[in-house]
Amino acid sequence: SFQNVGEEKNFVFLSKKIEPSSVLETAPLSDGLKKELAWNKFSGPTFTESYCWPPVAQGCDVVVISHQGKDPLLYIPPVLTLLQLESDYQALPNMVGTLAVILCPGWKKAQLVFDLLKTYREGCRGLHPMLIILGQNKEAASQVEIRGCKVVVTTPYNLLRLLEHNTWLLCRLCHLVLDEIEVLFSDTADKVFTILDCYKKATAEAPGNPPRQIIAVGTQWNKHITPLIKEFMNDPYVVITVTEEAAIFGNVQQVVQPCMNSSRTAELLKILDFTERNLQKVLVCTDSVTEVEMIHKALKSNSIVSLKKHKESKCNAKCVLERWRKMQSSGTPAVLVLADDCLQPLGITDATCVIHFSFPSPGVFRQRLQCMTDNFCTVIKDSAVDQEHKKAKSVILLTENSSCHAPGILRCLKHAGAEIPEELRDSTARVLESEENEKFSRPLCASLKTFGICRNRTACPDRHQINLATDMAQNIADEMVETPDRVTILPLLIVHATNYFGRIVKKQKDQYTVLAKEMNDYFKVPGHRISVNIVEKSVFYGLREGAICHRVQVVETPAKDEENVCEVTIKYIDEGRTSQVNSNQLLHLPAKFQSLPPQAVEIIVCRVKPIDNEVEWNPKVTDHINRKIRGKVHHAKVVHTLGKTVWVDPMVGVTNLAVMKMWINEYNIRSEILSTGLGTDNPEHVAEIQKLCRQMPVLDRAENLEHFTKEDTAGLEEVSNPQDTLIQENSAESCNTSATPPSDDVLETKEAEDSTVHQQKGCHPQIKWFQDNVTVTLKVQILRAADSKCEFSKEKVVFSAFSEGRLYVADLELYQSIIAEKSTCVIKDRETVILLVKEKKGAWCKLLKNKNVHVSLDFECWEESEDERPFTAG
């Protein structure tokens, strides 16, 4: 649902006056559609809908920017109402085609819009909506027929594929909707403008005067909206309910002025250096009563007449507003020093300049900008031409204490095209690094694992760096991957087209097969089925499903009901899937069945990703792969491992001809995905995963740090069309051969290059140290350190870095305590200098609790006092 998304209900910016329609009964919609909306318990219209529905229903071009901008109901009801006016379309040529096209940024949003159209089609006669998602197979586009369809929902990529084979498709097009306009323009601007050019050409050639309408909705302004309005729209209505987005459209000049916190007042006085020709109405905004008083006093002492208002002021809001209005009319610049909690009560909208004396949060930033809305431009400006004529100005004083809200403000300013000082970029980078470190206990980003990239790391809730304690706590046992060149995999849970959970099956004597038979035999005996009275989280239990018994682990236990039975969430530790069962179904699992480690591993097929820069697999692909591979034996080549995840390339479905001792390659999963036309090559995938693992952080003990980089290993071929290719397996060894004499029907296989499994351990660098009464200095002797990391705690410092292709790690347990937050690490060309600040002043008799041969005193820097005791080197 897109309802109740916290829009700024009292703010709307309009390029032209609109009479809002805030009640469904009087909304400009057809009666049938109103009934359908009411039947589906529609709670609107919302604030934004009340303003955008009227111009859309009138057939006007409309641009809507709102926090609700992802909601298709901003445009669906009025567009469906227009499509009921059949007389408007009588002049159109009697050809195959559609009246409306809704362009969405991806298949998932297109599916959602299509489902909404089906929901409300009862209130719209003859709607017959069509969802068109095509693969890259050319014949698919040529087979599409659009007959009796009023609305087509698709994406820019797919519409252009259609237009290649069906140039007449736009001949009847009257309504073009651009859904999530900021995403469309960010990812596919060239394709959207190509479609707009085609639509414009079709419009010019159409006979008569049929309705023509472009609707663009989104959550953010985009620079491409300006040419959209100027070149393709006809005097559009612009509706914006997000203040900072209205400020961009309104041509507000955004300025960031770096200064020291102690010199903010001096910087403010420079900005307020008025001339008689430049009379302005200026708000100086801050977040505290103390600063309001301080600023007002400073202005007064510099002969600048100003007003002040905060919650403790004696003068009420009405009095301040009257004086505010009178100041400029008297020929004097109007300056009001204002606390943030007085912004809404005053309701000022005619300021020409806002100075952010205290660094604002994004929410406060919006409130302050609203004070200038009367001076926002209401027509599109060419930024290059009109930059000097901006009527409104926003000035942020950026100090060393401004890091807290830096990322949010940086996004606003970059979005506005403002000049960004390096200080703000640096501050933001530090905050983002800190936020990423706070994700350290989160799972590793699924997109990063599956495709080698995460499109939006800032918004992604998961981590994007290796956590050794989590990712490698349960490594795949060596015996599970006896020969990385060919492992036998049984996929049991299909997450999506390239991500599965299953087991690696041993060729000779598979331990789990033996265990499963023993468990099934054991639990056949009724007396062995002992129900569990008290269910504990993370404990292993047995679960009997028919004649098959599973090992499961409880991952979540809600409160129990009156009968002492509850529904618990369990994980099948040998399959990877999760489920919910009643607690009384769980059985006591004898210790002999718990000794074998969980067998479920995560399997990722490499070098293939969705087409059209999609971030998720189309369900058609996942369903096809699920039907094809689940529960069937496959052979695969392991190219990389991390913890209990294996990356494989290729992974081939096989059939065993036991009599002939042969395996037949039936299909290659990657090739199967590509053949759907909905997948494409992803050549950087494995390299990105290996790059990620080269940046591993440091373990508590350096000797436990191992860097796994299993690169391509030889043996299993990539089969481009493996229907007739055979693999013959002997008991002693496996080799690749053809079961029949070579012929045209037997496809050649490609030999992969041999490479070895690399396993690096962190080397300990040489360290020299010296001290004074306050600090201890460590000089780490490595050249040109890269990817360095230094972590301080009260009694420990852990340093790691790469140098000339080798990983160096120093895990130092200190003899005495330090102040971690004051300690620093500086990377230099020939060495790294770590400065430790002592918790208690005085000399240390040694640096470390335990002797370390790699650590020694730096006698060249040692300042020895007369009463100094002997020191040990480490």
Image (cartoon, rainbow, N blue to C red):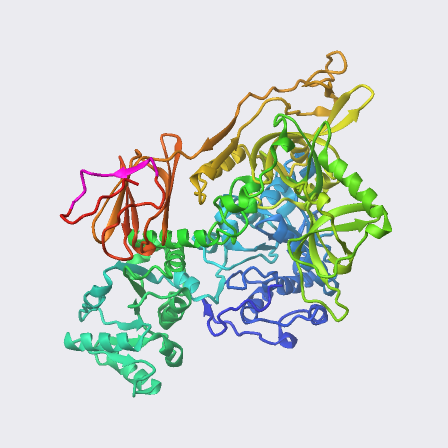
Bounds of the magenta segment: 852-864
Residue 416's quadrant in the figure?
bottom left
Q: Nearer the viewer, residue 130 or 441?
A: 441
Residue 666 in magenta stretch: no
Q: Is residue 540 above or below residue 165?
A: below
Q: Residue furthest top?
A: 741
Q: Is residue 368 above or below residue 106?
A: below
* Residue at the spot 27% in from the left edge and 72% down from the top edge: 282
Q: Nearer the viewer, residue 659 or 586?
A: 586
* Residue at the spot 67% in from the left edge and 61% down from the top edge: 557
Residue 23's quadrant in the figure?
bottom right
Quarter the N terminus occupies: bottom right
Answer yes or no: is residue 173 visible: no
Quarter the C terminus occupies: top left
Left or right: residue 329 versus residue 20 is left
* Residue 178 position within the rendered picture, expressed as x and y whole percent measured from the top left: 56, 54
* Residue 326 position within the rendered picture, expressed as x and y whole percent measured from the top left: 26, 83
Left or right: residue 295 versus residue 164 is left
Answer yes or no: is residue 431 visible: yes
Q: Nearer the viewer, residue 867 or 717?
A: 867
